[in-house]
Amino acid sequence: MHPDLIRALRDAKAQTFDSERPAIVERIRKSGKLTPRERIDALLDPGSASEIGAIAARAEDGRWVAEAGGVDFVGAIDGKPVVTSSTDYTDHGGGYGASRHGRLIALAREHRWPLIFFVDGGGSRARHPRLGRHDLELSGLMGRFTNIDGMAELSGWVPTVCIVSGPSFAGHASLAGFSDFLIATPGSSIGMGGPPMVEAALGKRLTPHELAPVEQHEVTGGIDRLVDDEPTAIQIAKRYVGYFYDHDEGRTPDGDLNDIAPDPGSSYDMHDIVAGIVDQGSLFELRENFAPQLITAFARLNGRSVGVLANNPAHDDARVDESAAIKIARFVEICDCYELPILTFIDTPGTIARRNLKDETNEAPTATRTHARALMAHQQRTVPLVSIHVGRQGGLGPALMTGYSSNEGVRVLALAWPSVTTGERDPFSTVYDQNAFDDIVEPAETRSRILNVLRHMPRRLDRREKKHPVDSW
């Protein structure tokens, strides 16, 4: 082949390399951010990256035209395949044509590969900015998905992660909202309508952060983790998808759980109890600052990935309000889709409902339609669930943590500690008997009892169709 043909292709691809745009790279680094290619390099195993879609078109004069708006790759994390993409906010605002992400989504769907997107940008674009130049487009639709229907299709089938480290609006925010796990950095923003749209509608100019700050999303459940910077966000994303796979072994926790376990009625933090049972260093919490009276986390037991669902009396006396019920439901769905056994730690006085009327918050010890979401999630659950009853078993609280177990979701093991509070039988006990346990055990026995029963229940990752989607909230 003639050297000029090779040179022309190399020159076109080089346009997107950091080495060919030093001024832009310097500007990105001064803002404390990583370039798109630096993000991908930090995310993927060395030597595993395979770029997709670097050439977008051929011009009328025969020149190759590099893609704009971001970069796309297939690669590996800890030897396991993933698909990933990063927008480039300095290039047409990070705008993508819809076909680019659709291609990656199609690969993730077919091969059941986890997906990680960096989604800072002003929104998707239907066509490339070369429109009207008579270029021959080469990055058209491959596969049957666009952004929105594709992400909905992946929900519950493969782990999907989005990272926001800047303004994320319109189509980019939609991608973030459809993901299982959403990570953001301080000062970023996520909203459906960006500042220009708001100004056109209301005549008021707001900065992206004034309009939709991620710090607000964190406490309302809109994001899963707020971290210090992009390198930390990347490490968190890698940890998250790692729970899709089991490890060969794990480190046994230190300390005697009999000494750590609480006396009846005492105040304590349930994190200490959980840490005394799962592998050392394996606890990975989700939505930590949303409904903190409830812990939702991934962890490992002898290397096996599990989900942890726990009441936490250190916050709001572990009462299950509407936010906690939402948190339960979505977490149960995630664990069920990805075949993670659930360990649930119970100590709650029951459910409450909160209503804001005329700037006043009213509370009542009752349940709402929102609380039903947790029960419905358990009703479709087929993964094993082990319940550890640490303290109070108030009202409907235990049922929201375990389900009614009237179908496939029967608990495989129900253990209680000597600190458990049992109640008098009442007219509703035929529906849910809060005093029904398989055994009363010493806290120090709990880990071995769980491991013994779960060894008979291997993960079933060979399914060819998903069970159900994961709720977007």
Image (spheres, rainbow, N blue to C red):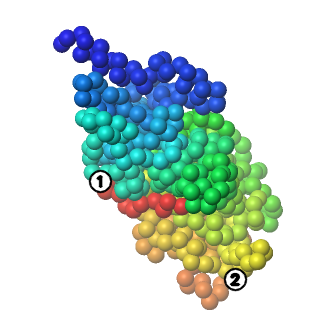
The answer to whether marks 1 and 2 mark residues whose Cβ atoms lie closer than 8 Å is no
Identify the mark nearer the N-term, 1 or 2: 2
For the residue pair 249 and 2, the one nearer the viewer reads as: 2
Instruction: List the residue tagged with mark 1.
Output: 464
Where's residue 405, x and y in %? Answer: 49, 72
Determine whether the residue tagged by mark 2 lies in a helix, strand or loop.
loop
Up-down: is 190 above or below 25?
Answer: below
Up-down: is 110 above or below 43?
Answer: below
Residue type at mark 2: give it.
Glu
Instruction: List the residue tagged with mark 2.
Output: 424
Where's residue 466, x and y in %? Answer: 35, 57
Sort mark 1 into few (<14), some (14-19) or many (20+) by Cα contacts within 10 Å: few
Q: Is residue 439 visible?
A: no
Which residue occupies the extreme bottom position in the image? 427
Q: Is residue 142 visible?
A: yes
Quadrant housing the N terminus: top left
Q: Residue visible at 40% across and 46% down? A: 125
Quadrant housing the C terminus: bottom right
Where's residue 303, x and y in %? Answer: 51, 41
Q: Residue visible at 64% across and 36% down? A: 229
Q: Residue visible at 55% across and 36% down? A: 234
Residue type at mark 1: give it.
Arg
Which residue occupies the extreme right position in the image? 266
Sort mark 2 into few (<14), some (14-19) or many (20+) by Cα contacts within 10 Å: few
| Left or right of 265 in this view: 464 | left
